[in-house]
């Protein structure tokens, strides 16, 4: 049986990540990058598809875990009838190749431990050859190799590396697993205790730059560390989530690969980083963006690989049964070829905000923006697949039009206030034409709400961003009544659905959880329209569904209290940060001061 998504904690080195269950099993790890093939894929299948378990032989009585404060160093205390042990897990972030360091420490009593290391490359497809080398084991299969170093004696059982050992109070027994290319030399052996100490210092040094000092600093800090862990340091790219194919409905088929850099998701992440004082990460992502989008603006993609790759072909992996039987398991993402007009607005907005925040830029950046605006000028009237990447027919999605408006609004502001050159009169005319059209064609007077698409009567929680980007002010009656309509029709048990999936708008079978980012957006509306007590209640409700180490997935099932979707999800943690700022007006950089209303 698949463990609940909320049972997992994250470790990572800002190049890739692993997911560790409450009971000491690493069930997901892709090496050497986020989007590489998994060497541990049990998360999407069974133990035979790869995992690394360190656990007491006895039945656990109690499990407690936490991150060391301000770090991504995980500690898990497991108590059995024989005593208590602690497992320390981390991936040192200052190494050129990925290392997973695990240390078993005795706390009380004498505890018998069992290690099971099932190494499988290419998402559980390749069973490697394993042989002994100096001070360890070497497993090779195709282009990949793993090296295990430990003082514990190991042996093979049924294509599994196994060890049994006892731990007494004060003992610390280390394990280090390192990935290397199979055609390269054996890696140097790292000192596991020094590696953990260095990792702890690295993360704490990074965390101390956070500028937020309000009520929710702990929650914001954990979310910022999670966003940093989803950053690919060599290039500055930011992935949307750590996993692929964790379902939006258990046993369903809404299972997607999120291990890529969505322009939309990354721009939201950039706002959160800038607000919190992380300018270096913001600058690195902006530079990644400029490299990734270079070329014909008609070829702008909604997502790229972490180094800017464009071919992200979607494939299914039939040998994996899927998380809780949710099939198919997908790698790659066909949405890469979709037309999503909103990303032009998000990209141009984030570059504008970066300039406002004082990040230096050159004329090359502005030339990229003007080329994107030229394309949008000729295509904003077209239907698209929209923010939710529908796999049904293209529509004139209202959110896409609003973000097209935002693109020209930011271009106008850049010329007016930053002395950049551009066709100011024409951009003003286009901005005003989009605004007039959206207000005329997307507002349903009978429903007293903006609707999902022109000619539709359906609601869409994405329209909650309308005042955030300045399309209309928060106190506009149409904004307030749209939020009230969403509150009536899309809220389930205090959380917000994206839209009604049973209305066949997205070309997929119905059914998914509530969408956490949309719930944060509604809390923002409440906070900015005088309903601060309700905003606070909704925010606290969202904080309460984080798992025990402060992580959120994309969606949530309020009826079964289960996290759903890919995990941890950048979108959700960005929403948490932004809403905390909106509820902390004493913070000088909260979003209300960040995006000015224009009309």
Image: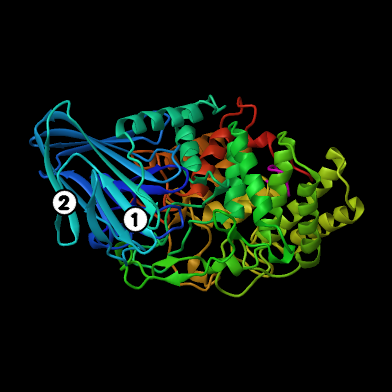
Residue 168 belongs to the span the image colors magenta: no
What residue is pinned by disc 1? Answer: 145
Name the residue nearer the viewer: 63 or 484: 63
Q: Is residue 153 above or below residue 29?
A: above
Q: CA distance from mark 2 to mark 1?
A: 18 Å
What residue is pinned by disc 2? Answer: 162
Q: Earlier in the sequence, mark 2 or mark 1?
A: 1
Label 2 packing within 10 angstroms: few (<14), some (14-19), many (20+): some
Q: Position of residue 237 (x, y in %)?
A: 57, 49
Q: Position of residue 78 (x, y in %)?
A: 19, 37
Q: Magenta region, mostly helix, strand or loop?
A: loop
Q: Which residues are magenta?
A: 469-475
Name the residue nearer the viewer: 446 or 146: 146
**Image point 81% across, 61% down: which residue?**
374
**Looking at the image, can residue 174 be seen?**
yes
What mark, if any, has residue 366 been given in the picture? none
């Amino acid at each position: 049986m698949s463990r609940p998504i909320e049972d997992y904690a994250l470790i990572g080195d800002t190049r890739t990540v692993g997911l560790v269950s409450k009971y000491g099993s690493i069930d997901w790890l892709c090496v050497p990058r986020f989007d590489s093939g998994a060497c541990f894929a049990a998360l999407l299948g069974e133990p035979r598809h790869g995992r690394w378990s360190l656990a007491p032989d006895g039945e656990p009585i109690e499990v407690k875990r936490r991150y060391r404060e301000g770090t991504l160093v995980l500690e898990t205390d497991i108590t059995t009838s024989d005593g208590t042990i602690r497992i320390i897990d981390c991936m040192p972030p200052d190494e050129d190749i990925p290392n997973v360091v695990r240390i078993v420490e005795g706390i009380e009593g004498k505890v018998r431990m069992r290690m099971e290391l099932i190494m499988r490359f290419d998402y559980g497809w390749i069973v490697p050859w394993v042989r002994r080398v100096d001070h360890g084991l070497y497993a090779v299969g195709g282009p990949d190799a793993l090296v295990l170093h430990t003082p514990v004696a190991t042996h093979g059982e049924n294509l599994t590396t196994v060890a049994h050992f006892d731990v007494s109070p004060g003992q610390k027994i280390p394990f280090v697993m390192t990935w290397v290319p199979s055609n390269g030399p054996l890696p140097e052996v790292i000192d596991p205790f020094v590696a953990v100490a260095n990792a702890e210092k690295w993360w704490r040094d990074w965390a101390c730059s956070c500028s937020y000092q309000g009520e929710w600093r702990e929650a914001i800090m954990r979310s910022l560390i999670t966003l940093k862990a989803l950053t690919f340091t060599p290039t500055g790219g930011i992935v949307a989530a750590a996993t692929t194919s964790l379902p939006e409905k258990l046993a369903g088929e809404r299972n997607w690969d999120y291990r890529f850099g969505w322009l939309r998701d990354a721009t939201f992440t950039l706002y959160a980083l800038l607000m919190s004082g992380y300018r270096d990460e913001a600058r690195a992502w902006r530079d990644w963006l400029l490299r990734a989008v270079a070329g014909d603006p008609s070829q702008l993609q909604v997502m790229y690989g972490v180094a800017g790759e464009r071919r992200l072909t979607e494939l299914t992996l039939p040998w994996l049964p899927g998380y809780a039987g949710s099939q198919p398991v997908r790698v790659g993402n066909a949405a890469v070829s979709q037309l999503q007009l909103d990303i032009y607005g998000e990209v141009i907005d984030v570059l504008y905000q970066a300039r406002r925040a004082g990040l230096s830029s050159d004329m090359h950046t502005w030339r990229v923006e003007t080329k994107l605006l030229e394309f949008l000028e000729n295509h904003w009237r077209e239907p698209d697949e929209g923010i939710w990447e529908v796999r049904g027919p293209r529509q004139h999605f209202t959110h896409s039009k609003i973000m097209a408006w935002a693109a020209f609004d930011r271009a106008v502001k850049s010329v007016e206030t930053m002395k950049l050159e551009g066709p100011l009169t024409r951009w003003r005319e286009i901005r005003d034409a989009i605004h007039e059209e959206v207000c005329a064609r997307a507002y349903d007077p009978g429903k007293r709400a903006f609707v999902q698409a022109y000619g539709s009567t359906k609601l869409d929680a994405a329209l909650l961003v309308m005042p955030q980007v300045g399309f209309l002010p928060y106190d506009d009656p149409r904004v307030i009544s749209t939020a009230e309509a969403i509150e009536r029709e899309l809220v389930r048990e205090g959380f917000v659905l994206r839209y009604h999936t049973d209305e066949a708008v997205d070309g997929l079978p119905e059914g998914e959880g509530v969408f956490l980012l949309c719930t944060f957006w509604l809390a923002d509306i409440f906070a900015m329209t005088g309903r601060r007590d309700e905003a606070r209640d909704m925010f606290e409700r969202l904080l309460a569904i984080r798992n025990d180490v402060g992580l959120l997935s994309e969606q949530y099932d309020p009826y079964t209290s289960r996290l759903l979707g890919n995990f941890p999800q950048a979108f959700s943690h960005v929403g948490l940060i932004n809403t905390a700022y909106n509820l902390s007006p004493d913070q000088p950089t909260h979003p209300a001061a960040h995006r000015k209303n224009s009309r």
